[in-house]
Amino acid sequence: MRIPISRFGNKTRQTPGVFGMFLALLVLSGCAYNTGSVDKDFAFTPETDSGLIIGSATLGEGNRWYEASFRFHFSEAGEPDIFGGRGGGFISAFPYNSLMRRTEPSDFKNATGTVFAITLAPGDYVFDNWDLDNGSTAILYPVNPKPLKFTVRKGEATYIGNLHMYLRTGRSLAGIRVVADGRPAILDRSERDIPLLLQRYPNIKRQDIDVRIIDDRPWGGKGPPAHIEARVAN
């Protein structure tokens, strides 16, 4: 299989549909799970021993419907445990049911995605991979991308940014428009996201939120783009 070349300059490994989804979930995330947001009545108290990461996850441009889905995988920083794993999960633009179909509408009028508020134990974490399911034939993901670091602080909500997947579409052999490629980015959409988050979680106060946008340059984001070393599987 030839390496797909796109305007994103982002060569990726490609695996076929159903098998690819199974393989990506096992290889990329280990024991990762789709990390859900806290209940809407969540509040910090003196007994709270965790912190929050908050932000949004979106894909494509505008509020156009895409069959594609993506996952940003994260894990605890540091050395793996004796079983070779680290605690973690993944964040996607939408909650999915068992058939990987969206279960909720977009939170935004001019974007496709949702806000999130996820509770984690205090400490250092990394986004260590991502994958893009184009909804029909393949899952795209980089090989050995550099980790993107972030920190969770006890009793604080940290806005880490808008996790966004830029998409490039093309035509299949049958002439059907499909998602052909993608590039991840972490953007500052705090002026849009934080008011919505405060509305959804009324017990979280603005003074509890620290804005710390994750530096996504190792993944080719803002600033000088970084090359992601990747291969393609037959």
Image (cartoon, rainbow, N blue to C red):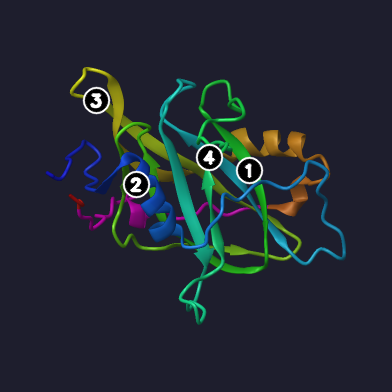
Secondary element at image label 4: strand
Residue found 48% across the figure and 79% down from its top: 79
Q: Of the residues shown, which amino acid type is indicated by label 2?
A: Phe
Q: Of the residues shown, which amino acid type is indicated by label 4?
A: Ala
| Residue assigned mark 2 | 19
Indicate whether 184 appears above or below 156. Answer: above
- The Cα–Cα distance between marks 1 and 2, rounded to whole angstroms, is 29 Å
Q: What range of the chain is rendered magenta? A: 210-231
| Residue assigned mark 1 | 116
* Residue 57's disc number: 4
Where's residue 63, x and y in %? 49, 21
Quadrant occupied by the N terminus? top left
Q: Of the residues shown, which amino acid type is indicated by label 3?
A: Gly
Between discs 1 and 2, the one toward the N terminus: 2
Q: Which mark is nearer the camera, 2 or 3?
A: 2
Main secondary structure along the magenta-highlighted residues: loop
Answer yes or no: do the residues labelled 1 and 3 have beta carbons within 8 Å? no
* Residue 170's disc number: 3
Let me know if residue 15 is in the magenta part: no
Quarter of the image where one finds residue 181:
top left
Between discs 2 and 4, the one toward the N terminus: 2
Between discs 1 and 4, the one toward the N terminus: 4
Q: Of the residues shown, which amino acid type is indicated by label 1?
A: Phe
- The Cα–Cα distance between marks 2 and 4, rounded to whole angstroms, is 25 Å
Answer yes or no: do the residues labelled 2 and 4 have beta carbons within 8 Å? no
Where's residue 108, x and y in %? 59, 26
Residue found 67% across the figure and 68% down from its top: 122
Answer yes or no: do the residues labelled 1 and 4 have beta carbons within 8 Å? yes
Between discs 2 and 3, the one toward the N terminus: 2
